[in-house]
Image: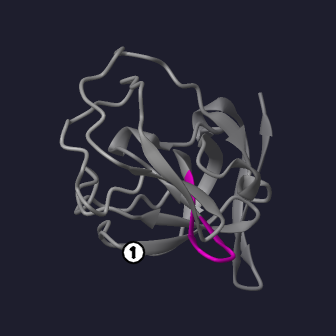
Amino acid sequence: VYDGSNKVTTSYNLGDGIKNIYCTLSMFNGTLEIIPFNDFGVANSTNNVVTPTVVTLANIANYQGQLVTVNNVLITGGGNWTSATSYVINDGTEGKLRVAYSDLPYIGTPIPIELQDITGVVYNYAIAEVDLIPRTASDIIRALGTSLSNLSSSKSIYSSNGKLIFSSEAN
């Protein structure tokens, strides 16, 4: 929904369903936008569950406007989340995470340095730039992986040509 004229005045929660949307449909940077004629009114249903589709950054462009999860993502950068900013993310393929709105609840919180599973809406911020936009802090969670406690006592860490190498055998 693109509401540049502030026609929608009702507040909604994640999981709210709305009907009777009177709008214009318009393409912007390859994404279909809903431009409302008026306020949508109260939610017709609440607590609806939308299950995100698990995708990779290599195929995320096929899911524009949809809720997706990308697993095992490394976020480049540091410091705190800032609004109107794009961050490079990588799951083996480089992509973009965009903090697109000034009211997102994770703005000002630290950017995690470990691998994350990130849920968000796929959006074309610019032509040929597909971004993942997390909605809440709970959309960015630490990826579940193999912890050192799950590995055998046969572990070794050493450096080689400027790289830190870790090897182990799983129990």
* Vertical comparison of 145 with 13: above or below: below
What residue is shown at x 69% (from left), y 76% (from top)?
Answer: 128
Total marks drawn? 1
Residue underneath mark 1:
85
| Residue placed most toward the observer, 31 or 75 | 31
Relative placement, left or right, of 109 versus 23 is left
Residue 77 placement (x, y as % from top left): 45, 75
Res 60 → quadrant: bottom right
Q: Is residue 100 magenta?
A: no
What residue is shown at x 69% (from left), y 37% (from top)?
Answer: 54
Residue 169 placement (x, y as % from top left): 81, 40
| Residue placed most toward the observer, 147 or 10 | 10
Q: How is the image coloured?
A: one colour
Q: Secondary structure at mark 1?
A: strand
| Residue placed most toward the observer, 136 or 89 | 136
Residue 64 placement (x, y as % from top left): 65, 52
| Residue extending farthest bottom | 161
Quadrant into which the C terminus falls: top right
Q: Is residue 127 magenta?
A: yes
What residue is shown at x 37% (from left), y 62% (from top)?
Answer: 111
| 10 Å crowding of disc 1: few (<14), some (14-19), many (20+) | few
* Residue type, label 1: Thr
Relative placement, left or right, of 54 versus 135 is right
* Vertical comparison of 43 with 87: above or below: above
* Vertical comparison of 49 with 90: above or below: above
Residue bounds of the magenta highlight? 122-130
The rendered magenta stretch, by its main secondary structure, is classed as strand
What residue is shown at x 39% (from left), y 64% (from top)?
Answer: 99
Res 55 → quadrant: top right
Residue 142 placement (x, y as % from top left): 49, 43
